[in-house]
Image (spheres, coloured by chain):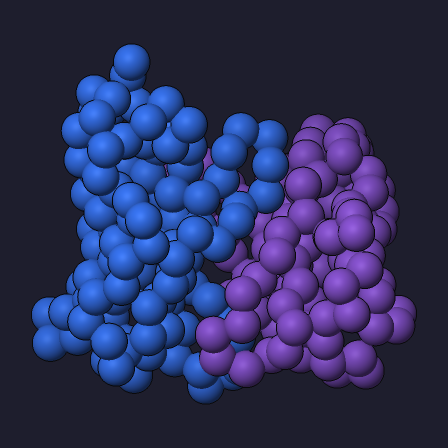
Chain colours: A blue, B purple
Amino acid sequence: GENVEQHPSTLSVQEGDSAVIKCTYSDSASNYFPWYKQELGKGPQLIIDIRSNVGEKKDQRIAVTLNKTAKHFSLHITETQPEDSAVYFCAASNGEYGNKLVFGAGTILRVKS
Amino acid sequence: NAGVTQTPKFQVLKTGQSMTLQCAQDMNHNSMYWYRQDPGMGLRLIYYSASEGTTDKGEVPNGYNVSRLNKREFSLRLESAAPSQTSVYFCASSEWGGLGGEQYFGPGTRLTVT
């Protein structure tokens, strides 16, 4: 089955700097890659997603890139702010069983002001 | 709209006890999911229901059962709790069960089994 690895497990950046989180997946049939943000004491919330027919997608300060050949995708956050501090999860799905997602282990992002 | 609600928020069980975690959504979504979250392991799918009347196993179904009571409600039952089931449990829903549907998560239930 699918396996998703996520790095780094923790990331500290200074406010205003950029943050990059990387994920690799094992199933070449995977074709949907969402990113979720989880704030303390809450459930995860979708922040951006990308499908396999697109190499990059942006939404204001957040972008995701996908390299299908290398089977990895990354989350880029520019001009980080203290409210970006949270746990970020990547996930992958091949659609074989509908909307089943396989998640990475998560990255704790701390933005220092 | 309350979105996805879960009860209880916290629960402590002794080994061998049973309990049911409740989940309800008011977004008229077709698909619902149960995940568990453990430190360093992300979220792992326990069971899901693509539509009312159907349920399927996820990655880690052993020790759990589910019931899709109606379109709104999806419950998770632990028949004989074990310490390995100590975790935070999240329920989620999506508009449809097809690829790419955004999943909306509830606030979670923190379960401790002693």
Which picture quadrant has residue B64? bottom right
- Where's residue A113, x and y in %? 29, 13
Q: Position of residue A100 (x, y in %)?
A: 51, 72
Q: Residue furthest front?
A: A60
Residue A111 lies in what quarter of the image?
top left
View extreme (top): residue = A113
- Residue A66 in the image: above or below residue A107: below
Quadrant hosting residue B16 = top right
Q: Residue furthest left?
A: A70
Total marks in image: 0
**Residue drawn at point x = 33 percent, y = 68 percent:** A50
Question: Can residue A110 be seen from the camera position used here?
Answer: no
Vertical position of residue B106 compared to residue B25: above or below? above
Q: Is residue A16 visible?
A: yes
Q: Position of residue A14 (x, y in %)?
A: 21, 20
Please state if B6 lies on the left or on the right of A45 as rendered: right
Front residue of this view, candidates B13 and A91: A91
Residue sitting at 22 percent across and 47 percent down? A76
User: Observer-nearest residue: A52 or B89?
Assistant: A52
